[in-house]
Image: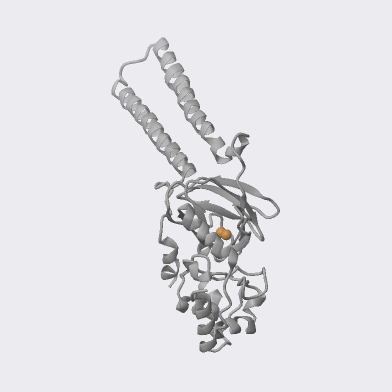
Amino acid sequence: MAAPLVLPGCAGGQSALDPAGREAAEVYDLFVVMVIGGGVIWLAVIGLLVHACRRRRRTWSEEGAGRLIAWGGVAFPVVALFALLAYAVWLMPSIRPWLDRSVPEPAMIDVTGEQFWWRIRYPAEDGMAAFETANELRLPVGERVAFSLRAADVIHSFWIPSLGGKMDMIPGRTNVLSLLPTKTGVYQAPCAEFCGASHAYMAFSVIVMDTKAYDDWRRRQAAGNRPGGSEGERLFAHHGCAGCHSVRGVTPVAGLGPDLTRFSDRRTVGAGALANTPENVARFIRNPSAIKPGATMPAFDMLSQGDIAAIAEFLTGRP
Ligand code: CUA
């Protein structure tokens, strides 16, 4: 039962071994160096062990044994471990590159982890207004971005394996993470800290776009939906959906649940739980906890099938 629910979350890249960002590439390089370095040390140790077993009948001179311990037991490990440590430390500043004052600090995208979804706020930038969205992050390729990471309830963890990371989101604290996406594409990001019953269903999509497509998307998001006067739009307000969810341009701002402005642009419903189709949206409205155990949204199975279908049509239709 659970497997089909998580499959939409598996679409797209989610591998730290297939980097699409500078930080992920550096972590990958570090991984390769560590594996090769560890492999060479392992081979040397096993080689010495075999050598020692073979000549067990001959006794070592005291001087020879002392030299082996000094070089093989102290000098070699110290040099090898120090070299690996120095390489790792040398890579570290790239995590917060503006600690080097010559790199300007980019505008922060605020991401807040909530049980069990992601609130995402884009700042006003380049003449485009600030706006809120949820569960889907779009980024321009080749531009450094920074995230201020918070948690509303318990500890979550922000990790986009293809781009880099990860960093915990801790209640009462703001953590900052910076990434530089280098390849356009669709990537998946899981919540990387156990945070409750639906931890496994807390994911977001990351879409790295070329600058023009990204700017168009931002402009559309900032502008919000256009009121269309549909039955679903009326029912969305009438049945109280608008009490928790904003659809900017159509309903007053309500900040409790995920912002659903231009929901039709999104790939999934329920933070990676299901593919975004009218049927799945209707299914989610009827009983969110059946799809995401522990979801805050109550079941709306008291509404008629027709009303639920109309609301799903409104959310997934062209705004
Ligand atoms: Cu949020 Cu695990």
In the image: residue 138, left or right of residue 63? right
Which quadrant holds the N terminus? bottom left
Q: Please tell me in which quarter of the rendered image ligand 1 is found.
A: bottom right
Image: 317 above or below 150: below
Indicate the quadrant where residue 302 lies: bottom right
- In the rendered image, residue 194, in percent from the top left (x then y), is placed at 56, 58
- Looking at the image, the residue that sits furthest to the left is 54
In the image: residue 182, left or right of residue 287? left
Image: 279 above or below 167: below
35 or 315, which is in the foreground? 315
26 or 219, which is in the foreground? 219
92 or 243, which is in the foreground? 243
Image: 46 above or below 117: above
Does residue 117 appear in this view? no
For the point 42% across and 61% down, which residue is it? Answer: 10
- In the rendered image, residue 183, in percent from the top left (x then y), is placed at 42, 49
252 or 255, which is in the foreground? 252
For the point 51% across and 61% down, which residue is it? Answer: 217
- In the rendered image, residue 113, in percent from the top left (x then y), is placed at 61, 59
For the point 65% across and 73% down, which residue is it? Answer: 244
For the point 55% across and 83% down, which residue is it? Answer: 232
In the image: residue 268, left or right of residue 242? left
- Looking at the image, the residue that sits furthest to the front is 127
Does residue 60 appear in this view? yes
Indicate the quadrant where residue 128 lies: bottom right
